[in-house]
Structure formats: C-alpha cells, structure tokens
Amino acid sequence: MFEHFDNPQDLFNYQLGMALTMEHDSLDMLRELEMAAQSDEVKSLFSHHAEETEEQIANVERIFEILGIEKHEQPSPTTKGLAKEGTSLVGKTDPSLIDNVVLSAALGTEHFEISTYETLIVASDAMGAPQVKALLEKNLEQEEHTSDELSSMAKKVAARTIG
C-alpha cells in the first residue's frame, strides 16, 4: 500500500498502521511473558498491562474511524525483534532470574511504544486533529505509567535476586 511517502498524511497513516501492529505484537508478547514470569506479582503486572493494551488497540482503531481511513496494519520489525530477543533470553536463563528478563523485555517494548506515540502526537497536533491527539495522548499516558511500574518492579526483583 505504501511504497513511497509523498506527504505527511501518508506518512502518518503508515505510522498509525505500524502502531496497530506494534500493539498487537505487544499483546502477544505480554501473554508470553506472563506465562514465563515466576512471581505472581510480575504475572499480575503483565495481565493488567495486557488489558490496557487491548484498550490501546481500540483507541488506535478508533483513530482510523475518525480519520475515515481503512484500518490497516503495517510491519513493525522493532516489536518483532524485541519479542524475539525476549523469548530467546527466557530460553537461556535460569528460572531464578526469569522475572529479571521478562521485566527487561517488557520495558524495552514500552520505550519503543512511548517514542512511537510521541511521534504520532506531534503529527496529529500539526494536522489539527484534536480527537486523534487525545486518543494518542491517552495511550501515551498508559505507556508511561506502565514503564514506571515496570521500572519499579524491576528494581524490586533485582534487589531480591541480585542485591
């Protein structure tokens, strides 16, 4: 569908499709990380974030509707790579350190999602699309909150396993 970007709208539409793929990849990854996690605390954190991710998917899908464009996914090689790296590390890690690994993998994904939403927010603001911007900001706020929760949990787990 997109071979070359001739205008900002085409680029935004592509990046929006990439964000949809990113969130679907994240949801799949969260389910895998939740199953791999050792502690109930970490499992619960991933379960909660999976619910938020489903809301984020709905928000992105709503943006397609608002803009009157067909919902489409675009490749997101970064999220595929982060998921693959996380799965690989889980397979190489002693069970006593799995929570360290899954939290690190989830945190890496959050940082990518945050930067993606920041970029889309800038573009939606420039486009003069306040409804779109509001939905993107909601997703960004959730991602930033989750990043903070993951960081806190990673510190707690590291103190137990490393410190």
Image (spheres, rainbow, N blue to C red):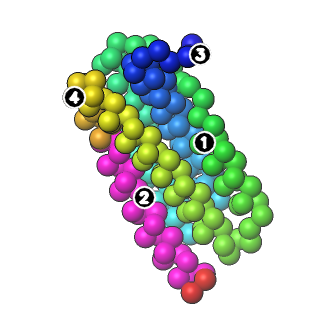
Q: CA distance from mark 2 to mark 1?
A: 17 Å
The kind of secondary structure element at disc 3 is: loop
Cα–Cα span, label 4 and label 1: 28 Å
Q: Amino acid at mark 4?
A: Pro
Quadrant including the N terminus: top right
| Residue 86 position within the rendered picture, expressed as x and y whole percent measured from the top left | 66, 55
Question: Which numbered disc covers residue 64?
Answer: none
Which amino acid, mark 1? Answer: Thr
Disc 4 or 1, which lies upstream in sequence? 1
The percent position of residue 36, horizontal first and vertical second, equals: 65, 59
Helix, strand or loop at mark 4: helix
Q: Which residue is mark 3?
A: 3
Is residue 145 in the magenta section? yes
Q: Residue at x 57, y 87 (%)?
A: 163
Q: Work out which residue is located at the far right of the displayed protein and give it.
A: 92
- Asked if 28 appears above or below 96 in the picture, the reply is above
Residue pointed to by mark 2: 147
* Numbered disc in front, either 2 or 1: 1
| Dominant secondary-structure state across the stretch colored magenta | helix
Q: Which residue is mark 1?
A: 78
Instruction: Calculate the distance from the C-alpha at mark 2 to the C-alpha at mark 3.
Output: 33 Å
- Image position, residue 94 (x, y; %): 74, 72
Magenta-highlighted residues:
138-161
User: According to the image, label 4 marks what residue?
Assistant: 130
Q: Earlier in the sequence, mark 2 or mark 3?
A: 3
Q: Quadrant of residue 139?
A: top left
Indicate the secondary structure of the residue bearing disc 2.
helix
Q: CA distance from mark 3 to mark 1?
A: 19 Å
Label 3 to label 4: alpha-carbon separation: 28 Å
Residue 87 spot, x, y in % from top left:
70, 53
* Mark toward the viewer: 3 or 4: 3
Position of 101 compared to 56: left or right?
right
